[in-house]
Image (cartoon, helix red, strand yellow):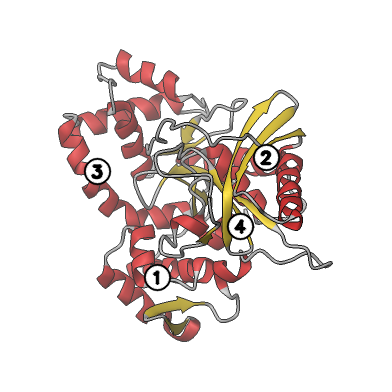
Amino acid sequence: MEVVALLACVQSQEQAHALWSLGMRTTGLDEAAVRHELDGARFVRTHILRPTWHFVAAADVRWILALTSPRVQRANGTQFRATDLTPAVLDRGAGLILDALAGSRHLTRPELAEVLREGGIDVKGQRLAYVLMHAELEALICSGPLRGTTSTYAVLDERVPPTPARSADAMLAELTWRFFSGHGPAEVRDFTRWSSLTTAQARAGLELVGDRLQRAAVDGLELWYDPLRGGLLQSETVPDQPDGDPSALLVPLFDELTLSHPRLGFAVAPDHPHPPGYDTYTGSVLVGTQDVGAWRRTVRGRRVVVETWLAPGLPAATLAAVDRATQRLATFLGRDLESVRPAAPPAKNRAPQRA
């Protein structure tokens, strides 16, 4: 939960990868422990900040929604109109969902789809996703305990105790501080893209935070960061091992490191095995500040198959670092590792869904 609170919100569109995003930033925790905290609602998964899922600490979910969801709801208006989801339909859907979930009856997405159909609401196409998202953004529902590997929904008020209301300035200052403290050094436009707030709001937030953040000019960019923490970029630089050997990271899909800093531009190894047009449903292999390949995992019972596609000609020490990183992932998952290095990169695959 501490990692989630540090980053304020952690994108969890692909939940299994998002759990590894948390594991990658901790020591001594495995996936079962992280899932236990999610099941216990120390943090929850819900649509927040942008029209996609995030992990957010229970203590933060209500005030972050209060600050950011109005803009997300306005942005969703285009889809609401395109799918004929009028305010009356959305409100009726939210009522049906709340009635079905009341009393800690945690239901899956297909089960809620049936509830809505029985209540006379068409859930074809994207309508189901946007009815559920509307209820999440209105602070009515959030994630319930996992049912095996399947997500459930719950009534937010039954999962998360009430928290004191905050003023608009207090919410804006807190979110500004939390973003730059956890993700900095970062630009204002990194914050606005992450938070869905306007540039004017972001600048006002920096004024409210005052000298708790410092400003630096790097390559013509204005960056803000917490001088006491050093920020995400410093903490996520891959340190060498004590013996001087390099270290590697298997960076998950939609990780905060790459999502929040699209101009970060890790150097790409020559002949990188992930050319344009190939499967985007893979993570990145980083060694130091160089992107040396791609990776994908498949859980098969007590085993996890980790496939890595690496640039040719990497030194033995780098290959050994990647081996250590794959073993760390397997240890986090609590499974035996089967490491595979296919000769060819993965064929083009489906694009991950946003909602």
Q: Quadrant of the C terminus?
A: top left
User: Quick check: marks 4 and 2 in contact, CB under 8 Å?
Assistant: no
Label 1–label 3 contact, CB within 8 A: no
Marks 2 and 3: in contact by CB < 8 Å? Answer: no
- Looking at the rendered structure, the kind of residue marked 4 is Val
Identify the mark nearer the N-term, 3 or 2: 2
Q: CA distance from mark 3 to mark 2?
A: 32 Å
Kindly identify which residue carries mark 4: 3
Of labels 1 and 3, the one closer to you: 3
Give the residue at mark 3: 76
Q: Which residue is mark 2?
A: 36
List the residue tagged with mark 1: 170
What's under tag 1, amino acid-wise? Answer: Ala
Q: Amino acid at mark 3?
A: Asn
Place of residue 44 in the rendered image (x, y in percent of width and height, measured from the top left): 53, 44
The numbered mark, 1 or 4, whose residue comes first in the sequence reads: 4
